[in-house]
Amino acid sequence: MIVFIEQYFFAENENALKAIDRIASIHKGVETARESVIPDWAYRDVLFMLIHYSIASFESLERKLSGEEKEEVFNVFYRVGVRMGLKELPSSYQEWLPVGEQHLKAICPILILRKIFFCNTKNILALFAIMFWLKDKN
């Protein structure tokens, strides 16, 4: 994933598109090997997590993003999704907010715990790390 990020975000447009095409090709190879298609909702879930955590991590480490900056982050990942051929993508950050929230609540226990315990993401990740460490000890 780090290689993809470097190839996409820090590359000229043509190289960025090639990076997305490589990711799509890898997924097609997985589908062929497994003889099943990865459903669109699974791609959307990952894409939505990337949007959310890109914004949340920046805001956690640096500063709050403006609405315009959040829209820009969304647009980057929207273009990735479109290039990969995903369907039923919201076309703006404002359209994504309720859909993304619904997806993330369904798939991401970190967000659920965050709401329950009123913790920030770093604290929840630390909690998960401790839980996994304790599980390995038993």
Image: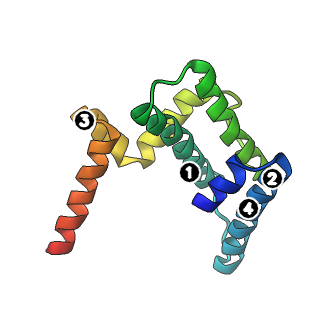
Proximity of marks 1 and 2: CB atoms separated by less than 8 Å? no
Q: Residue at x 41, y 36 (%)?
A: 61
Q: Residue at x 80, y 52 (%)?
A: 17
Q: Is residue 1 visible?
A: no
The residue where tag 1 is placed is 46
The residue where tag 3 is placed is 116
Dot 1: what SS? helix
Amino acid type for the residue under numbered disc 3: Ile
CA gap, disc 1 and disc 3: 23 Å
Q: Earlier in the sequence, mark 1 or mark 3?
A: 1
Q: Nearer the viewer, mark 4 or mark 2?
A: 2
Q: Earlier in the sequence, mark 4 or mark 3?
A: 4
Amino acid type for the residue under numbered disc 2: Leu
The residue where tag 4 is placed is 24
CA gap, disc 4 and disc 3: 36 Å
Task: Report x, y in % for residue 90.
Answer: 67, 33
